[in-house]
Amino acid sequence: IEYITSSYFNKKEDTRFSSSVGKFVGFTEQGVKIAANWNKDASYLSAMKALKEVYCLHNVQNWYNNM
């Protein structure tokens, strides 16, 4: 299971956080700057990594039971 969240501007993906990578990755010039700033914040990165357990792992059994 992987948690992914992305931010877009003008239909272009600027940044993406992937729980597999464990950090933000920028895809545009502005996105690289934003990702670098977010990656410097250890508490924000920890919170994003925790979302895999909070959101994905918490709900996975419910999703599989309802299929």
Image (cartoon, grey):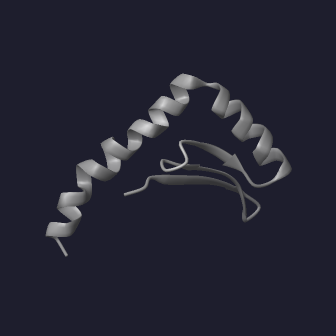
Q: Where is the N terminus found, in terms of image quarters?
A: bottom left
Residue furthest to the right in view is 29
Please report the residue visible at 53 percent of the width from the left and 32 percent of the height from the top: 45
Image coords of residue 62 (percent x, y) = 18, 60
- Asked whether, in this view, residue 31 is left or right of residue 65, the answer is right
Please tell me whether residue 54 is drawn above or below residue 11 in the rendered image.
above
Q: Where is the C terminus found, in terms of image quarters?
A: bottom left
Image coords of residue 28 (percent x, y) = 81, 53
Please report the residue visible at 18 percent of the width from the left and 59 percent of the height from the top: 61
Please report the residue visible at 32 percent of the width from the left and 42 percent of the height from the top: 54
Total number of numbered discs in the rendering: 0
Please tell me whether residue 14 is drawn above or below residue 44 in the rendered image.
below
Residue furthest to the bottom in view is 67
- Asked whether, in this view, residue 36 is left or right of residue 66, the answer is right
Image coords of residue 8 (percent x, y) = 68, 56
- Asked whether, in this view, residue 38 is left or right of residue 65, the answer is right
- Asked whether, in this view, residue 38 is left or right of residue 54, the answer is right
Image coords of residue 57 (percent x, y) = 28, 50
Residue furthest to the front in view is 21
Please report the residue visible at 52 percent of the width from the left and 23 percent of the height from the top: 43
